[in-house]
Image (cartoon, rainbow, N blue to C red):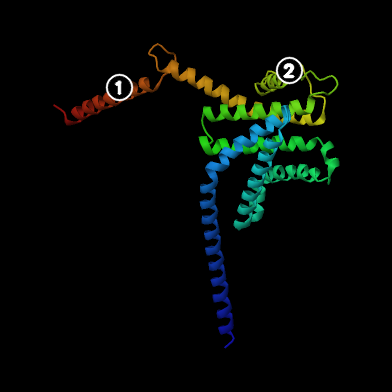
Amino acid sequence: MSAEPNGETTDKTVTDAHAKRTLDRERYKLAARIGRALAAPMTVLGFIWLILLVLDFTSGLSPALRGVSYAIWGLFVAQFLLEFFITSNKLAYLRRNWITAIALVVPAFRVFSVFGALRALRAIRGLRLVRVVGSANRGMRALGSVMGRRGFGYVTSLSLIVGVAGASGMYAFEHGVAGSTITSFSSALWWTAMTLTTMGSDYFPKTAQGRLLCFLLALYGFAVFGYVTATIASFFVARDADTSEGDIAGARQLERLEREIAALNEKIDRMMSQSRSGP
């Protein structure tokens, strides 16, 4: 008699687990459909957001462009909240998108400052660094959705995005600082290009935010420089291998060697067959 309630409890547990798995699958499918539907417009807005960041840091935004920036920011926040509430594993979602979450919070400080609240946060220049990193991250994601996150073209375009975003941030941090030689956006671009190509520069950032940004740019340049070097080297190696005078065997030379070895093996097999059969 006592086994019957236990059986009912087990059946209910199995049913609840099955219902939860079904709900999770439906949520995943819904999130995937929403992601596909929003991929194209959010990719375009990601590039526009990055351009507005560069303009804001270098020359400032007009009231109209600032309104466009706030509108795009609102759409990004709405997308993030929608995906967050739909997904079943919210903690995993936050771990994957923590940079995006922080970058979306920062513009709220400026919105509040318009109404007089949190005005002192304008002096916290570290928020600009978060904006630079967050905007570059969104630009990377937009580029990845367009180019598929692979290939030399993707790495080159990605480096261009990082370079422009990094230069705008460095200009915002170092412009007007005593002893700074970065007096224009062009000089900031030159300095950033030298850092990304690991050539270095005589200028050393004066602000703490500039030094941290310098470290992040150098870290990216160090990681990408090896890939670029290997790609260029493989190009010349492949070109040398395609010539008959090259010191390195290419695909055509290897194919010819394989055919010759196969013919030699067939000849040896025939000779051995003849020797076994005897006169």
- Marked residue nearer the N-terminal end (2 or 1): 2
Residue 69 in the figure: left or right of residue 210: left
Residue 54 lies, in percent from the top left, at 68, 30
- Residue 186 — which label? none
Residue most toward the front? 64
Q: Residue furthest top?
A: 245
Q: Is residue 40 left or right of residue 81?
A: left
The quadrant of the image that shows the N terminus is bottom right
Decide which of 271, 187 is in the foreground and name it. 187
Left or right, 188 with reference to 16: right
Residue 25's spot in the image, x, y percent? 52, 59
The residue wearing badge 1 is 260
The residue singled out by tag 2 in the image is: 201
Q: Amino acid at mark 2?
A: Ser
Above or below 244: residue 167: below
Whether residue 36 sits left or right of residue 257 in the image: it is: right
The one of 43 and 99 positioned closer to us in this rendering: 43
Of 150 and 174, nearer the camera is: 174
Is residue 152 shown above or below 18?
Answer: above
Instruction: Give the CA distance from mark 2 to mark 1.
Output: 55 Å
Amino acid at dot 1: Glu
- Mark 1 lies on a secondary structure that is helix
Helix, strand or loop at label 2? It is: loop
Q: Please give the name of the residue rendered at 54% of the width and 68% of the height, measured from the top-left corner.
A: 19
Q: The C terminus lies in which quarter of the figure?
A: top left
Front of the two marks 2 and 1: 2
